[in-house]
């Protein structure tokens, strides 16, 4: 098969990117026959086995090469690839795939279970679902038992609230990230790699005002840090184009990216309504992922050689972009809150003001992490570091509205859509870290009121963002309520805008399908179970005990380079395992928190520490002696 992507985007080349695909069919047995039907179907008869090999390629040569200039021949590449595997057996290909995939997937396990149930029939039904949902257990299931379909499980969740479906959806998010974002691939876009259309909705593009960032929220806590490499490669590409955009469009230093990009790493403001097009904070938000990678992995080489130069360019733009107002504050102007209007004093809808809460929160986050990065790698005397130290205190503070919620704009404008899908003004709560119980208790209370004000309705990604925000507030009941809100079956033939929910294959619905909510769900569940800073570790901070009173997790990551195992039973913490493999420090001091109790532990790198439910250290051992299955219930 050959084809092209003719383009509304590439006007000078009507052919656009060329692509090819080859399907090779192998059969076994002496009597096997292949029939070609209607020139578009294959029929295999009397064969002992059949193996289908599909290879595909395109002429895409990177964002800085126009399709008309590409020298790649996708058809030739397909034949070369097919030739390289033509003599490889199916069993070898399958074993190679399992080794590649399971090495990542099996790093984390999660079990969520009910309490002892008096209802025998309900218990039997749920246990059958747990068994039939796993391929590994398929041989144990009686062939006479009717297996529940995935769509039936989703449909019944509103009544049975099966915890194993939450487990499945959590691991499904990890599976999707493993499958769509690996070193050397493109960044995961709105549909990951599962777009079915030649011209997908919203162009299937990376959107930088929540969607692309949410795609990578689970990478670090869910122990898949390698899956972030395409994101970092993409940020590097954006910085190249973004430096041109900053210079040409704004006469500014550094680099910038706006709300929507594409495979060509576009960084300029988009066409269309200003409410979404004019938002030059996309690159800054992405830069927070660079620091987070260091915070979880403690990889100083990454911080020094990859992250810091990109952060420095971003900070340079932000310093150029800020202007002083009449009150002495450094403002962003013009400024929007992504995709959300307000009512101006003249009674008309408007979207542009100055220093939207999200702008200020992102800049504050970037400035703080940049200063921390400079401290780690010994760059505190750089001139730009001094400029940031002077500028950060002059940013406008986050304000509280008359109704007690966080103001989304610089003034307490009337909001014509209080249930808007974006939670832009809550960036400082999640995924940011500028709204905290310790430092800003008044803003914590205002953030809670903001979430109540926004309500529960919204597309899938909005639902999982709310789940994560409620988890960060340690409000387990509302976090779980949003989980239940997401696990609703959507009929693709009768869906409505911003409905949210899940399709029968567990893809998340906007509608239509967007993969960000699948990733956001995994990250939000991880946030309910483990929260952290570089020096603090919070155990089960937003666990809905009445829904998941029994459970265990193994392999979740925490900031500071630590890994965590937890086992709880009938609502009480039983055991905790913590270890660090940080090669840059021999000892890590960590404050461990659980239900108001806090202990300080000095963790030696390379040792496994076992604590009981009262956070008393029971024993230590080397990682090679670490128990493998003591946290399975």
Image (cartoon, helix red, strand yellow):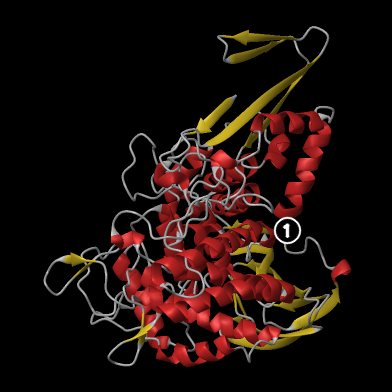
Place of residue 569 in the rendered image (x, y in percent of width and height, measured from the top left): 64, 67
Residue shown at 45%/64% (left/top)?
A: 245
Instruction: List the residue tagged with mark 1.
Output: 107
Residue shown at 34%/49% (left/top)?
A: 499
Q: Could you say which quadrant of the image residue 246 lies in? A: bottom left
Residue shown at 60%/59% (left/top)?
A: 231
276 sits to left or right of 242: left
Place of residue 59 in the rendered image (x, y in percent of width and height, measured from the top left): 61, 38
39 sits to left or right of 406: right
**The residue tagged with tag 1: helix, strand or loop?**
loop
Counting labels gives 1
Residue shown at 69%/54% (left/top)?
A: 183
275 sits to left or right of 168: left
Image quadrant occupied by the C terminus: bottom right
> Relative to the observer, which residue lies in front, 274 or 182?
274
Place of residue 291 in the rendered image (x, y in percent of width and height, measured from the top left): 60, 74
> Relative to the observer, which residue lies in front, 140 or 222?
222
Place of residue 439 in the rendered image (x, y in percent of width and height, measured from the top left): 47, 89
Image quadrant occupied by the N terminus: top right
């Amino acid at each position: 098969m050959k084809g092209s992507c003719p383009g509304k985007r590439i006007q000078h080349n009507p052919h656009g990117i060329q692509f090819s695909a080859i399907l090779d069919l192998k059969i076994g047995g002496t009597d096997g026959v292949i029939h070609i039907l209607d020139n578009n179907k294959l029929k295999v008869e009397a064969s002992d086995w059949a193996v289908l090999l599909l290879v595909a390629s395109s002429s895409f040569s990177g964002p800085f090469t126009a399709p008309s200039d590409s020298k790649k021949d996708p058809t030739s590449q397909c034949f070369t690839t097919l030739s390289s595997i033509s003599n490889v057996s199916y069993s070898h290909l399958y074993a190679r795939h399992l080794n590649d995939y399971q090495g990542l997937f099996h790093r984390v396990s999660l079990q969520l279970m009910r309490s002892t149930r008096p209802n025998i029939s309900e218990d039997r039904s749920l246990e059958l679902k747990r068994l039939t949902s796993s391929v590994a257990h398929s041989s144990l299931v009686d062939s006479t038992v009717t297996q529940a379909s995935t769509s039936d499980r989703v449909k019944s969740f509103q009544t049975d609230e099966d915890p194993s479906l939450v487990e499945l959806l959590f691991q499904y998010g990890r599976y999707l990230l493993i499958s769509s974002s690996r070193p050397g691939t493109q960044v995961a876009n709105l549909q990951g790699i599962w777009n079915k259309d030649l011209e997908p909705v919203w162009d299937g593009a990376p959107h930088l005002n929540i969607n692309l960032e949410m795609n990578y929220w689970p990478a670090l806590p869910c122990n898949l840090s390698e899956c972030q490499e395409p994101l970092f490669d993409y940020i590097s590409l954006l910085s190249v184009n973004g430096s041109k955009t900053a210079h040409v469009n704004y006469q500014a230093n550094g680099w910038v990216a706006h709300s929507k990009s594409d495979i060509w790493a576009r960084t300029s403001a988009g066409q269309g309504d200003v409410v979404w097009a004019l938002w030059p904070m996309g690159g800054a938000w992405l830069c927070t992922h660079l620091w987070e990678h260091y915070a979880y992995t403690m990889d100083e080489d990454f911080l020094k050689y990859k992250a810091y130069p990109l952060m420095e360019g971003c900070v340079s733009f932000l310093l150029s972009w800020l202007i002083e107002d009449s009150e002495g504050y450094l403002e962003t102007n013009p400024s929007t809150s992504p995709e959300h209007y307000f009512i101006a004093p003249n009674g008309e809808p408007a979207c542009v003001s100055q220093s939207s809460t999200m702008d200020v929160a992102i800049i504050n986050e970037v400035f703080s992490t940049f200063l921390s990065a400079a401290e780690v790698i010994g760059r505190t005397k750089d001139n730009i570091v001094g400029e940031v130290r002077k500028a950060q205190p002059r940013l406008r503070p986050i304000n509280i509205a008359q109704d007690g919620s966080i103001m989304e704009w610089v003034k307490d404008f009337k909001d014509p859509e209080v249930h808007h899908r974006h939670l832009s003004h809550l960036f400082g709560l999640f995924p940011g870290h500028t709204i905290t119980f310790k430092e800003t208790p008044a803003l914590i209370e205002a953030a809670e009121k903001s979430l109540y004000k926004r309500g529960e309705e919204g597309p899938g990604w909005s639902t999982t963002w709310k789940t994560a925000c409620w988890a960060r507030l340690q409000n387990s009941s509302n976090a779980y309520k949003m989980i239940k809100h997401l696990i609703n079956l959507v009929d693709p033939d009768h869906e409505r805008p911003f409905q949210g929910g899940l399709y029968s294959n567990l893809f998340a619905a906007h509608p239509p399908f967007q993969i960000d909510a699948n990733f956001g769900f995994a990250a939000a569940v991880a946030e309910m179970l483990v929260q952290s800073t570089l020096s603090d570790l919070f155990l089960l901070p937003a666990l809905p005990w009445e829904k998941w009173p029994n459970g265990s997790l193994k392999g979740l990551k925490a900031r500071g380079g630590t890994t965590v195992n937890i086992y709880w039973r009938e609502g009480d913490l039983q055991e905790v395992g913590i270890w660090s493999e940080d090669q840059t420090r021999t000892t890590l001091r960590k404050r461990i928190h659980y239900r108001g109790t806090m202990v300080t532990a000095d963790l030696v790198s390379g040792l496994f520490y076992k604590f009981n439910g009262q956070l008393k250290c029971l024993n230590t051992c080397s990682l090679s002696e670490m128990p493998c299955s003591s946290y399975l219930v």
